[in-house]
Image (tube, helix red, strand yellow):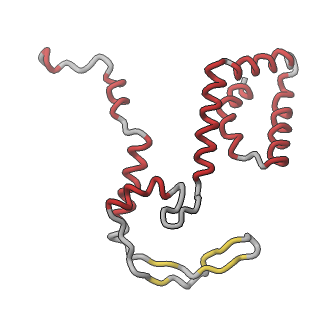
Amino acid sequence: MTEDETPPENAENDLASRFPTAYTILFCLIALVAALTWIIPAGQYERAMNEEVGREVAVPGTYQTVDPNPQGFVDVMLAPTAGFYDPDSYAANAIDVALFVLFLGGFLGVMNATGAIDTGIRSAMRHLEGHEIWMIPILMTLFALGGTTYGMAEETLAFYAILVPVILA
């Protein structure tokens, strides 16, 4: 190996910097699925209301092919926003959840930067010194109360990264 062919000092960091981002992976999946709409024949099932589950479900044995709807370049470009709302009717799909997660992430970023979360955990551990095992039922009660009073479900996801180290400790 000559001087010009020496490997970089941080070969592992160089490899990690070339790994595709989540957005790149998602875009590639969207493009792949759009390409498959040109290959796989389109079809659908008849749907009927199932009272047990409270929503429409596919009726077995009713599959039939329909006119193809191949997705083009414009459809691929609009796919990320179409997941949030329907561009044809402007009906909201998942925009409320996406914005909620965005704001919750910002809130936790500010709380983490100010040190409020770490201070709160330290204070709780100081008060429960010798009785740390009570932290789990207390948190379970708080999350159950939030879930039953105002439907807190997705909100708990942000706390997992904070609570796992506390519970494991």
166 and 121: which is toward the camera? 121
> Total label count?
0
169 and 18: which is toward the camera? 18
Looking at the image, is 72 positioned above or below residue 160? Answer: below
Quarter of the image with the N terminus is top left
Residue 131 percent across, percent down from the top left: 87, 21
Q: Is residue 82 left or right of residue 114?
A: left
Instruction: Say which residue appears at 26% left-offset and 19% top-offset.
Output: 8
Instruction: Name the quadrant containing residue 73.
Output: bottom left
Q: Is residue 77 left or right of residue 152?
A: left
Looking at the image, is 2 positioned above or below residue 133? Answer: above
Residue 9 percent across, percent down from the top left: 29, 16
Instruction: Say which residue appears at 54% left-offset and 62% top-offset.
Output: 90
Instruction: Name the quadrant containing residue 51.
Output: bottom right
158 and 16: which is toward the camera? 158
Quarter of the image with the C terminus is top right
Instruction: Say which residue appears at 55% left-offset and 85% top-offset.
Output: 62
Residue 68 percent across, percent down from the top left: 38, 77
Instruction: Say which residue appears at 37% left-offset and 62% top-offset.
Output: 34
Residue 57 percent across, percent down from the top left: 64, 74
Looking at the image, is 138 positioned above or below residue 116? Answer: below
